[in-house]
Image (cartoon, rainbow, N blue to C red):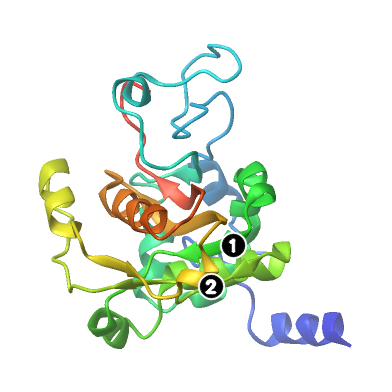
Amino acid sequence: MRPLAQRLLDVLIPPRCLRCGGVVASQGALCPSCWEAITFIDAPLCACCGQPFDFDPGAFAVCGACVAKRPRFHRARAVFRYDEHSKALVLRFKHADRTGAAATYARWMARAGAELLKDADVIVPVPLHRWRLLKRRYNQAALLSNALGALSGKLSVPDALARTRHTKPQGFMGRTGRGRNVRGAFRVARPKAVVGCKVLLVDDVLTSGATLSECVKTLQAAGAVQVDVLTLSRVVLADG
């Protein structure tokens, strides 16, 4: 009955492209032109941070940035580049109540981070401060975490981390300012959920990595034995 009900719903309310809003064949899909516009991240990439390489330097190669300063996380992966073409996907999901896209994005993330998801004991989203959550009404990272949990059978703990300070928006801050802005802004609210565990930390976008790094630091201090990062999108460095 469920497939029939979905077909009837699609007739009454035609499925729309997640990016441009055009009519598509099924719910949670991109139209062909939008699919072509999105730059999905695939190998070859840095074995540590997931930054894509322009050429294949061989298995287990690490980018220059990770050699110079190893990130706090063990590994990071993302589905697509965060750029002028993909920005609408992320912002509509984050700010425009496009919560129904979470299931599709989780499937993409499960493919991009298959190795990370396989190793994880628990999935934890980056939290919002309670005032921002009240204004937005949902945490997009928690939606992704829960959808990944349902897809993989792994435990998602959306309240494992809590944001203790209402930090300033970081859009126009540099790397140093972002790090200062989020320093000490998180605590582990559910220690038993992470102690001795391999944690998969989930968010919508990886930019400078300041927020994710502070979350990783907090989880490690609480007893997590390994923290990997999986995001829907990421900023790609020009020299990657």
Q: Residue at label 2?
A: 157
Numbered disc 2: secondary structure: loop
Callout 2 amino acid: Val
* Res 26 seen here: no
> Which disc number belongs to residue 122?
1
> Which disc number belongs to residue 190?
none
- Marks 2 and 1 in Cβ contact (< 8 Å): yes
Establish if 76 lies above or below 189.
above
Residue 181 x/y as whole percent: 13, 57
Q: Earlier in the sequence, mark 2 or mark 1?
A: 1
Q: Nearer the viewer, residue 191 or 173?
A: 191
Taking the image as shown, residue 151 lies to the left or right of residue 35, namely: right
Q: Nearer the viewer, residue 77 or 52?
A: 77
Taking the image as shown, residue 89 lies to the left or right of residue 1, namely: left
Residue 89 x/y as whole percent: 43, 59
Establish if 136 lies above or below 61.
below
Residue pictured at 64% horizontal, 69% vertical: 155
Residue pictured at 47% horizontal, 60% vertical: 19
Q: CA distance from mark 2 to mark 1?
A: 7 Å
